[in-house]
Image (tube, rainbow, N blue to C red):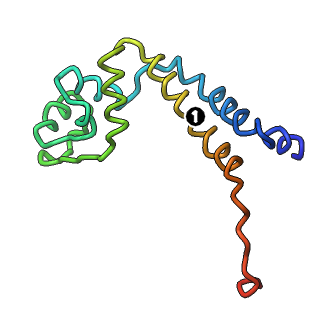
Amino acid sequence: MDRIARFFAGPHGPLRLALLAALCSLPALGVGLQSDDHLMRWAVENGAGPWDLFQFDAAFVPTRRESGFFPWWTSPSFQISFFRPLSSLLHWLEFTLYPQLPALMLLVNVALYAALVWRPPALGQRVRIAPLEVSRSFEL
């Protein structure tokens, strides 16, 4: 265990962790579009704007229920809207710029994931946040 801890410690530890995370994510590149990816592609092809990919109104339900995306028992008045501006913009750009390349879409996501794994620990090392001190009054 000490060997693994030493490998991920030090100034290059966060980068090594990010590379490991990206390496573990690479098998997803061969999977292609999945479940809601088809829904988002359909929405972009039918004129959805860059901020509208996670908004579903009641007019949307009948056609998706007939196609089998929603189950038969879905309420005709079902509507839902998620506030996901960055995800919506990124997916809209992907389906606008390279709709036939799902591996490239997934590669962008792997790169973003690796960046998110790498930066917070690297920032913590740079700022050198002191460990939390427990007050003696709270000790058992």
Relative height, residue 4 to residue 138 (above, below)? above
Q: Nearer the viewer, residue 43 or 19?
A: 19
Q: How many marks?
A: 1
**Please, which residue is most extreme toward the top here?**
100
User: In the image as oriented, which residue stretches furthest toward the right?
Assistant: 2
Q: Dot 1 surroundings within 10 Å: few (below 14), some, or many (20 or more)?
A: some
Q: Name the residue rendered at 89%, 46% in the picture.
A: 2
Q: Which residue is at 12% across, 48% downward?
A: 77
The vertical placement of 50 against 71, above or below, is: above
Percent across and percent down for residue 29 are 53, 20
**Which is more toward the observer, 98 or 60?**
98
Q: Could you tell me which quadrant the C terminus lies in?
A: bottom right
The residue at the point 23 percent across, 36 percent down is 52
Residue extending furthest bottom? 137
Q: Quadrant of residue 32?
A: top left
Which amino acid type is shown beneath numbered disc 1? Ala
| Quadrant of the rendered image containing residue 120 | top right
Residue 106 x %, y %: 48, 23
Residue carrying label 1: 115
Q: Looking at the image, is 7 positioned above or below residue 133? A: above
Residue 62 percent across, percent down from the top left: 13, 35
| Vertical arrangement, residue 140 with respect to residue 106, above or below | below
